[in-house]
Image (tube, rainbow, N blue to C red):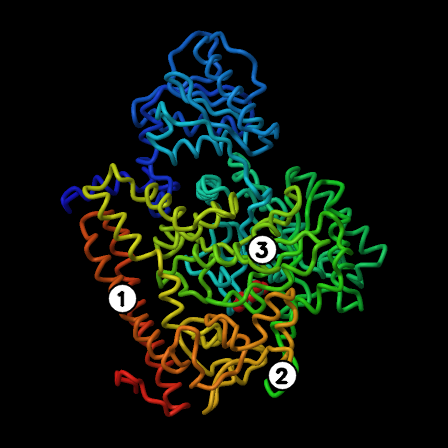
């Protein structure tokens, strides 16, 4: 498509009208009207009742109004249809073709369903004659089935398509918003947010744009997410009030998200009984405290009957917690779980607990050990409705870390894996960094050794009773939702992996591309797709190449965590050190001579990580302090690896930018411009990383680059 046609393209990829007249136009992300063309040109019959069935009807009606199709809701007369979306227990219709399709669907289900129910969210898709049929046991399943039809486009109507049955592997697929209600003096409206303000809050009050909240719910549902916490885990005074005085604001959000099957959760302060209830203590074993939580929680459910539960960061980075009262985290979590249990709610209790007032001189304390040391002795003591939420790595959402050993050490606890979609340490949505491959590696990691159960299995749990997947959201009130338009792919990929953690993230990326850049709206769809893959597929590894080397982590600018500052945290209280000196770099976490962290893994990995000879290159400096001359498995020395990867990383970013330029005039100009701007910044910042890291290690080691490239 040429530039003069670009206006048409814009029509196809933006929602038609601003959601509110005073708001800027909002990008449609992976649900542009064009993605509904195939569905919208068909004759569609929806059969069943319920709030989410109404949502399905609404979606189909809008698509058909745009593309010339037709829609009927449980008609009492005979109609010719191409697609049937029906609840299985909705009564018979006086329509032989539709009933034949439904029976064919039932037969297919009996055959491929292994006798298992579809469940609250599952669905079946099958073909019978000229008709595609989607069956579900519950309205949410029908909605997910509809979005599946959208993703399939014309393929959903392929006569040869065999029947398929889909059920989410994980019951809870959750996003955590670190959004503040009142603007925080340091962290702003959204802590670690890189996409403008909050979708929910502005300057101490609700943002008031519930249409945008609903549009957000729609996007999330189409990715598979079904739960969301709406305020920061660091709970300040104003945010604490969401539990009581400001509960109405939460209820409004819940109302806007409910039609898309998304439940609302709340981050609460462990000190709430004192802060809000006027009690003198928040001791989890105190009767009055327990009564306060029970009564308060009852009021929450009176107002929001499908409320999801509480999320708690306790005794961490200044947040209150049970340690104040000499109690442990099982006492703390169980207190809230007990209050939530009668209503079917859950408490997500975070395992991110460590000493953030460490003395850098003290080599015996290791932040990486903290979560395991605090929590594994408590295994088996948590109530059934407690989910222990564990960050994927032992330190903090780094570009590369080993997988947290806690995930393999608490068999009697429901564990959720916590990912970070917001790119705090991975380029802050100014850099292209597609995180799918990284999450895929984490999910496929087999902590008990190759061939054994994986992290995905842990999150799924026995008989689906695991804690699921949770991620910190990367969205805000930015017109592109995520600041960087290509960062939308991270959000989409998270949702899809939470639905099926065994899927190939690159395949998911392709799915996102087809939806977001519909081939029918592009002159050269093949070029667009190929170029996007070339730019995005390996972008996380590119980011890794030009930032902190070999899993050593941090080296970011303190406070904002953007850009290089090699020694920024080296003499700080945060426990994140690299120990570079003139001879070598890295943290000795072996059992033999270091902090012993390597011993927190089950035997296979404890042994592999214990020795620099067997430790995988990419996490070598996480586990070992080695000389610059140490030879990696790759055959390169550590110092030469640092130089090579940093030069290569910047070249790759420059190539990304050149490739992006070939899409000029091919895609929506607003997207093109925004990404172009950010690529300029990515090139600048990557260059800064390269030069600072290379110069730093050259000065420390005195070892020149074997290839004689410029180091300062
Ligand atoms: O990575 C750190 C962030 C903090 C965050 C904390 C956490 C919400 O720098 O901003 O606080 O993690 O996960 O609680």
| Cα distance between the residues tagged 2 and 1 | 45 Å
Of the pair 484 and 392, the residue shown nearer to us: 392
- Name the secondary structure under disc 3: strand
x then y, percent, for residue 642 = 38, 78
Q: What residue sits right under mark 2 in the picture? A: 593
Q: Quadrant of the C terminus?
A: bottom left
Q: Earlier in the sequence, mark 1 or mark 3?
A: 3
Mark 1: few, some, or many residues within 10 Å (few <14, many ≥20)?
A: some
Q: Quadrant of the N terminus?
A: top left
Of the pair 226 and 258, the residue shown nearer to us: 226
The quadrant of the picture showing ligand 1 is bottom right
Of the pair 370 and 486, the residue shown nearer to us: 370
Q: What residue sits right under mark 1 in the picture? A: 680
Q: Earlier in the sequence, mark 2 or mark 1?
A: 2
Q: Tell me if I can see residue 179 in this picture.
A: no
Q: Is residue 285 above or below residue 626?
A: above
- Name the secondary structure under disc 2: loop
Q: Is residue 588 above or below residue 514?
A: below
Q: Is residue 15 above or below residue 394?
A: above
- Name the secondary structure under disc 1: helix
Of the pair 112 and 482, the residue shown nearer to us: 112
Q: Is mark 2 within 8 Å of ligand 1?
A: no
Q: Residue at x 33, y 25 (%)?
A: 65
Q: Tell me if I can see residue 38 in this picture.
A: yes
User: In the picture provided, is 562 more to the left or to the right than 167?
Assistant: left
Q: Is mark 3 within 8 Å of ligand 1?
A: no
- Find out whether the residues at labels 2 and 1 contact each other: C-beta distance under 8 Å: no
Residue 417's label in the rendered image is 3
């Amino acid at each position: 498509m040429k530039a003069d046609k670009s206006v048409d393209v814009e029509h196809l990829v933006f929602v038609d009208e601003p959601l509110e007249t005073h708001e800027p136009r909002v990008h449609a992300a992976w649900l542009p009207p064009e993605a509904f063309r195939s569905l919208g040109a068909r004759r569609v019959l929806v059969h069943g009742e319920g709030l989410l069935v109404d949502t399905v009807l609404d979606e189909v009606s809008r698509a058909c109004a745009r593309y010339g199709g037709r829609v009927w809701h449980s008609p009492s007369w005979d109609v010719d249809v191409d697609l049937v979306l029906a609840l299985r227990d909705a009564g018979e219709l006086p329509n032989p073709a539709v009933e034949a399709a439904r029976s064919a669907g039932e037969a297919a289900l009996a055959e491929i369903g292994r006798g298992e129910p579809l469940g609250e969210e599952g669905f079946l898709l099958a073909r019978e004659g000229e008709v595609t049929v989607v069956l579900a046991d519950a309205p949410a399943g029908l909605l997910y089935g509809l979005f599946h039809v959208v993703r399939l486009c014309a393929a959903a109507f392929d006569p040869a398509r065999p029947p398929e049955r889909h059920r989410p592997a994980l019951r809870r697929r959750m996003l955590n918003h670190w959004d503040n209600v009142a603007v925080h003096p340091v962290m702003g409206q959204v802590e670690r947010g890189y996409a403008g303000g909050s979708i929910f809050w502005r300057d101490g009050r609700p943002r008031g744009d519930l249409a945008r909240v609903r549009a957000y719910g729609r996007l999330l549902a189409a990715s598979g997410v079904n739960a969301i916490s709406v305020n920061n885990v660091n709970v300040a005074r104003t945010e604490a009030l969401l539990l009581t005085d400001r509960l109405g604001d939460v209820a409004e959000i819940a109302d806007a998200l409910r039609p898309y099957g998304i439940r609302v959760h709340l981050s609460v302060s462990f000190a709430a009984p004192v802060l809000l209830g006027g009690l003198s203590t928040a001791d989890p074993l105190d009767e009055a405290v327990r009564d306060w939580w029970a009564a308060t929680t009852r009021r929450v459910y009176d107002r929001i009957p499908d409320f999801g539960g509480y999320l708690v960061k306790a005794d961490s980075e200044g947040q209150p917690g049970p340690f104040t009262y000499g109690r442990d985290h099982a006492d703390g979590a169980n207190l809230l779980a007990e209050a939530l249990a009668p209503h079917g709610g859950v408490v997500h209790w975070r395992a991110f607990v460590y000493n953030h007032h460490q003395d850098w001189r003290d080599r015996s304390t290791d932040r990486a050990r903290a979560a395991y040391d605090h929590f594994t002795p408590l295994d088996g003591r948590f109530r059934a409705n407690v989910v222990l939420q564990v960050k994927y790595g032992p330190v903090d959402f780094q570009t590369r870390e080993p997988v947290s050993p806690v995930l393999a050490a608490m068999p009697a606890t429901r564990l959720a894996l916590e990912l970070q979609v917001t790119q705090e340490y991975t380029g802050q949505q100014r850099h292209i960094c597609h995180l799918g491959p990284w999450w895929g590696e984490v999910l496929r990691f087999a902590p008990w050794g190759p061939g054994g159960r994986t992290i995905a299995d842990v999150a799924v749990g026995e008989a689906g009773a695991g804690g699921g997947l949770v991620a910190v959201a990367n969205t805000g009130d930015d017109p592109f939702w995520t600041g960087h338009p290509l960062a939308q792919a991270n959000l989409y990929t998270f949702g899809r992996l939470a639905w099926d953690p065994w899927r190939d993230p690159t395949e998911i990326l392709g799915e996102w591309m087809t939806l977001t850049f519909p081939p029918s709206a592009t002159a050269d769809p093949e070029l667009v797709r190929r170029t996007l893959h070339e730019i995005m597929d390996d972008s996380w590894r590119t980011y890794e190449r030009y930032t902190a080397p070999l899993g050593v982590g941090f080296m970011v600018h303190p406070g904002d965590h953007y850009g290089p500052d090699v020694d920024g945290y080296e003499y700080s209280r945060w426990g994140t050190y690299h120990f570079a000196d003139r001879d070598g770099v890295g943290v000795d976490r072996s059992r033999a001579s270091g902090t012993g962290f390597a011993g927190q893994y089950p035997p296979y990995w404890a042994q592999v990580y214990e020795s620099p000879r067997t430790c995988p290159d990419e996490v070598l400096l996480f586990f070992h302090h080695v000389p610059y001359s140490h030879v990696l498995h790759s055959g390169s020395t550590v110092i030469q690896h640092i130089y090579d990867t940093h030069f290569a990383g910047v070249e790759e970013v420059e190539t990304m930018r050149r490739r992006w330029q070939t899409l000029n005039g091919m895609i929506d100009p607003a997207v093109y411009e925004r990404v172009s701007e950010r690529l300029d910044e990515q090139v600048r910042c990557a260059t800064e990383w390269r030069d600072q890291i290379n110069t730093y290690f050259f000065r420390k080691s005195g070892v020149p680059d074997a290839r004689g490239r410029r180091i300062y």
